[in-house]
């Protein structure tokens, strides 16, 4: 997947090549109506957005408080069974799909992910909406997975894993056209690409490998539309809850741990994700 030449993300509106995404192409998100910065929040629309965002936050809180959400944990007995060679992962995929479908049904922005293979090829994070054709709809992805997987719930000997990526932006700013979450050398994208390429998980070694899909704020929340950005932020807790695990990047060039957002993300992941472990990444990974 490591191809020579400049990154396709340096252009605009380029379709993701079929030979890269393959069967995943069926899950590419719908093309947004506008790819440029939208600045149409009149005082009237701001008032409507406040009402809409408050209602969405209420639905999010109500959903996270439901007993079937709070009790959806992976027990040691379940993990022991899945760790066995030849274990069937299809029910895990169905359970994850159900959670993702419920999150999408709350309204607001849908749950979107980035495949590690895209990061490996492009060597940087795709941005939504500009690079929409590199981003996947998680619900449609899991539906396609079930259509294409083998009797063990795997494709190319891997089971799917949705990973929430927690990090602090390297180049923040109020201008959405210049603010960026990664360094100029794109060290975070490189780390996630390598993590995905390896496909390992200490819980399920040595019998299972995983096909990693990352929820990344830069790709999962609209960066140019204030309306959809606010609603996407409202849904961040359920985006965490829809994932299997959380990976965080402890950067040497920006302070990750003290930020309130990143602390909240880890608390949510500890409560709602299936994995009992956090994935720790830093500048030294994978060495």
Image (spheres, rainbow, N blue to C red):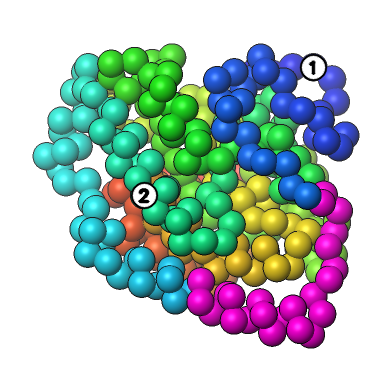
Q: Quadrant of the N terminus?
A: top right
Comparing labels 1 and 2, the label whose residue is closer to the camera: 2
**Which numbered disc flags the more N-terminal residue, 1 or 2?**
1
Residue at coordinates 51% horizontally, 71% vertically from top-left? Answer: 56
Q: Which residue is mark 1?
A: 4
Helix, strand or loop status at disc 1: loop
Percent of width and height locating residue 232: 60, 62
Report, in whole angstroms, how far the alpha carbon at label 1 lies from the one at label 2. Answer: 38 Å
Nearer-the-camera pick, 234 or 117: 234
Work out whether 194 lies above or below 234.
above
Q: Which residues are magenta?
A: 34-56
174 lies above or below 163: below
Q: Position of residue 287 (x, y in %)?
A: 55, 32
Rendering coords of residue 214 (x, y %): 53, 42
**Which of the numbered marks, if any, corresponds to residue 99?**
2
In the drawing, what numbered circle is on residue 263? none
Q: Is residue 170 visible?
A: no
Of 38 and 169, nearer the camera is 38
Q: In the rendered image, is residue 271 in sight?
A: yes
190, 245: nearer the viewer: 245
Callout 2: SS: helix
Q: Is residue 52 magenta-colored? A: yes
Describe residue 119's horizontal placement relative to residue 263 as left or right: right
Percent coordinates x, y for residue 107 in the rendering: 52, 61
Please tell me which residue is depicted at 42% across the width and 48% down the height of the picture: 100
């Amino acid at each position: 997947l490591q191809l020579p030449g400049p990154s396709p993300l340096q252009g605009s509106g380029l379709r993701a090549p079929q030979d890269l995404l393959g069967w995943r192409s069926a899950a590419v998100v719908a093309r947004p109506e506008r790819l440029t910065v939208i600045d149409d929040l009149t005082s009237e629309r701001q008032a409507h957005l406040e009402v809409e965002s408050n209602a969405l936050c209420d639905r999010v809180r109500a959903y996270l408080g439901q007993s079937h959400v709070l009790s959806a944990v992976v027990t040691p007995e379940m993990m022991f069974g899945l760790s066995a060679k030849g274990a069937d992962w299809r029910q895990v995929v169905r359970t994850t799909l159900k959670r993702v479908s419920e999150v999408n049904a709350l309204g607001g922005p849908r749950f979107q992910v980035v495949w590690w293979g895209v990061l490996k090829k492009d060597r940087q994070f795709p941005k939504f909406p500009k690079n929409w054709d590199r981003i996947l709809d998680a619900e449609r992805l899991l539906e396609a997975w079930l259509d294409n997987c083998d009797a063990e719930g795997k494709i190319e000997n891997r089971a799917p894993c949705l990973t929430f990526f927690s990090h602090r932006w390297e180049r923040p700013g109020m201008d959405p056209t210049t603010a960026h979450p990664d360094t100029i050398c794109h060290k975070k994208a490189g780390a996630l690409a390598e993590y995905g390429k390896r496909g390992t998980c200490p819980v399920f070694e040595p019998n299972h490998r995983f096909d990693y899909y990352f929820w990344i704020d830069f790709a999962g929340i609209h960066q140019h539309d204030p309306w959809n950005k606010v609603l996407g932020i409202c849904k961040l807790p359920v985006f965490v809850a829809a994932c299997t695990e959380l990976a965080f990047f402890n950067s040497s060039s920006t302070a990750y741990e003290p930020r309130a957002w990143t602390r909240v993300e880890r608390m949510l992941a500890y409560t709602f994700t299936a994995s009992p472990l956090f994935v720790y990444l830093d500048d030294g990974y994978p060495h």
